[in-house]
């Protein structure tokens, strides 16, 4: 009974936060498959050993994911470099966002391409702020930078996207 | 933030994120299955089954309870100066004030008998890594239980309940994690 409850609890939790964590992991990995490996490693570690800790679980998990991604990158760097050379790098990456239809699909691709062109340090702040809903203080702690730096990178990222993307006019 | 950036921010927030694949959920399920099974049925260092006949500790605890009852009975006798000619059995003296309900058949013995035992796990803490024997890292888990034992006298339906908090510390080799 308790086991079933625990199972339900993590599944419910993962259903709500899994997509955000996956997108977060994608910023620090080369492919969706790598991102899923990293999310798995970080989530299992969190659920087994860290969920009793005080603080915002989302921020704790993001930190855990970043560490797992760094470890993963160290382990996989040689293999990934070979694959990237063979496949042309970007072709290996899959979409950040769920597929959409019609004009929305085209817009999503534009946004995604613009995100890919952002400097990594700006993109990670944007992802943590917009889709993981962390505060600048939490982002700063996760990335080891000051809150002011996090806020500036966020503004630069938005400005760069604004420059690349045409505004959408509704109605 | 100007209006166009605010509009862009709103547009980005409205994008639907890609969900983790079902394969990832399956992998998590199998990895966390061991965790949930352990939570449901923790391996105990000793048995605390509900069937009192399997209690390995019954002997000395029952003896302790009998001694406490005997002491209580002695005190009651001293305080109320009961006639020395008719001392009552300790079990009855300890519950002398209780009202007998449902008079039991004469064949039932006038003494307390263990009838139930429960233990409730009310807290589980991972205390992190510690070193034992100098340099062996282990993970220490603290399980906190409330054990409750019940005795009953079938002759007069009086009962005695005893709750004892208990901490159980388990160490797991760090290499398992």
Image: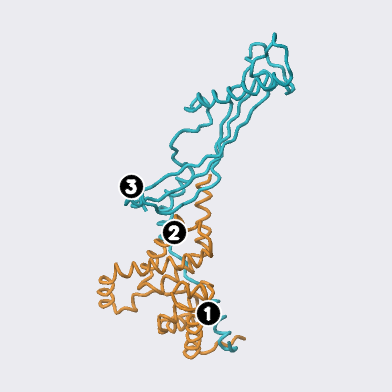
Which residue appears at 41% of the width and 52% of the height?
A: B30
Which residue appears at 49% of the width and 52% of the height?
A: A7
Residue count near mark 3 (Cα–Cα under 10 Å), binned few <14, some 14–19, many ≥20: few
Residue A153's place in the image compared with A28, above or below, is below
| Residues at circles 2 and 1 in contact by the CB criterion of under 8 Å | no
Quadrant the N terminus of chain B occupies: bottom right
Which residue appears at 35% of the width and 51% of the height?
A: B176
Residue A38's place in the image compared with B1, above or below, is above
Horizontal and vertical percent for residue A93?
37, 75
Horizontal and vertical percent for residue A21?
46, 68
Q: Chain of mark 1?
A: B
Residue A144's place in the image compared with B68, above or below, is below
Sequence order check, earlier mark of 2 and 3: 2
Sequence order check, earlier mark of 2 and 1: 1
| Residues at circles 1 and 3 in contact by the CB criterion of under 8 Å | no
**Residue wearing tag 2:** B25
* Mark 2 secondary-structure assignment: helix
Residues A30 and B49: in front is B49
Residue A146's place in the image compared with B93, above or below, is below
Chain with colour cyan in the figure: B
Measure how far apart labels 2 and 1 are at the Cα level. 26 Å
> Does residue B176 appear left or right of residue A104 in this picture?
left
Residues A164 and A56: in front is A56
* Mark 1 secondary-structure assignment: helix
Label of residue B133 in the image: 3
Measure how far apart labels 2 and 3 are at the Cα level. 39 Å
Residue count near mark 2 (Cα–Cα under 10 Å), binned few <14, some 14–19, many ≥20: some
Q: Nearer the viewer, mark 1 or mark 3?
A: 3
Give the color scheme: rainbow, by chain, secondary structure or one colour.
Answer: by chain
């Amino acid at each position: 009974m308790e086991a079933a409850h625990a199972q339900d609890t993590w599944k419910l939790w993962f259903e709500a936060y899994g997509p955000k964590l996956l997108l977060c992991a994608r910023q620090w990995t080369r492919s969706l498959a790598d991102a899923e490996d990293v999310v798995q490693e970080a989530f299992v570690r969190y659920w087994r050993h860290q969920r009793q800790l005080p603080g915002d679980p989302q921020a704790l998990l993001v930190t855990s994911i970043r560490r797992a991604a760094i470890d993963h990158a160290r382990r996989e760097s040689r293999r990934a470099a070979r694959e990237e050379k063979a496949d042309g790098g970007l072709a290996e990456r899959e979409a950040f966002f769920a597929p959409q239809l019609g004009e929305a699909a085209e817009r999503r691709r534009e946004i995604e391409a613009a995100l890919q062109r952002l400097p990594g340090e700006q993109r990670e702040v944007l992802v943590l702020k917009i889709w993981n809903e962390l505060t600048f203080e939490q982002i700063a702690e996760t990335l080891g930078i000051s809150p002011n730096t996090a806020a500036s990178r966020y503004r630069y990222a938005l400005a760069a996207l604004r420059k690349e993307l045409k505004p959408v006019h509704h109605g | 933030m100007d209006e166009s950036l605010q509009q862009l921010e709103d547009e980005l927030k409205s994008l639907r994120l890609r969900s983790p694949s079902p394969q990832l959920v399956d992998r998590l399920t199998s990895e966390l299955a061991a965790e949930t099974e352990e939570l449901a049925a923790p391996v105990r260092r000793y048995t605390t089954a509900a069937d009192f006949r399997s209690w390995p500790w019954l002997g000395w605890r029952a003896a302790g309870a009998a001694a406490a009852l005997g002491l209580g009975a002695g005190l009651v006798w001293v305080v109320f100066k009961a006639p020395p000619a008719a001392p009552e059995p300790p079990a009855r003296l300890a519950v002398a004030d209780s009202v007998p309900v449902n008079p039991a058949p004469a064949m039932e013995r006038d003494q307390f008998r263990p009838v139930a035992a429960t233990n409730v796990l009310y807290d589980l803490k991972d205390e992190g890594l510690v070193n034992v024997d100098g340099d062996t890292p282990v993970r220490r888990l603290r399980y906190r239980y409330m054990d409750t034992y019940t005795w009953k006298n079938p002759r007069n339906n009086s009962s005695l309940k005893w709750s004892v908090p208990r901490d159980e510390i388990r160490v797991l080799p760090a290499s398992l994690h």
